[in-house]
Image (cartoon, rainbow, N blue to C red):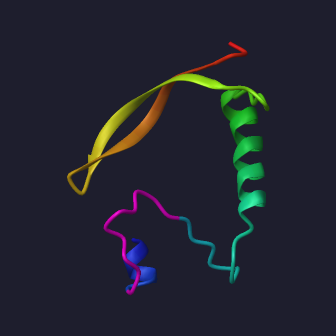
Amino acid sequence: ETLVIHPLLAVDDTVGSMYSPGDGTIDASNVCDAYKRVSRAKYGAIFAENTRLTKIRTRQQKINARPAVQGIEVVQTTSG
């Protein structure tokens, strides 16, 4: 889908992309804040700053014959 919008992009090593048709650019900080708000409201996500990640377990799938993360099953930090 990315190549349809930008056919000259090299996407051989790309797993995902974002497109904002109304903007010339996307403010990454605002996008992250929006993801954070939705994650809290919809999924009950907890965000802990200044915390070390000690374990993460993901579900895998293959995209273009390359492994890609389909979802996160377990996240463990020094805060729990």
Q: Give 57 or 50, whichever is nearer the viewer.
A: 50
Q: Is residue 69 above or below residue 50?
A: below
Q: Give 37 or 15, whichever is nearer the viewer.
A: 15
Magenta extent? 8-17
Q: Magenta stretch: residue 16 in it?
A: yes
Q: Magenta stretch: residue 55 in it?
A: no
Q: Quadrant of the N terminus?
A: bottom left
Q: Name which residue lies at 69% across and 29% down.
A: 45
* Rendered location of residue 7, percent (x, y): 38, 85
* Residue 71 relative to residue 37: left or right: left
Q: Give 77 or 37, whichever is nearer the viewer.
A: 77
Quarter of image, res 53: top right
* Residue 23 relative to residue 16: left or right: right
* Rendered location of residue 23, percent (x, y): 70, 80
Q: Main secondary structure of the magenta part?
A: loop
Q: Name which residue lies at 75% across and 67% down.
A: 27
Query: Which residue is farthest left?
Result: 65
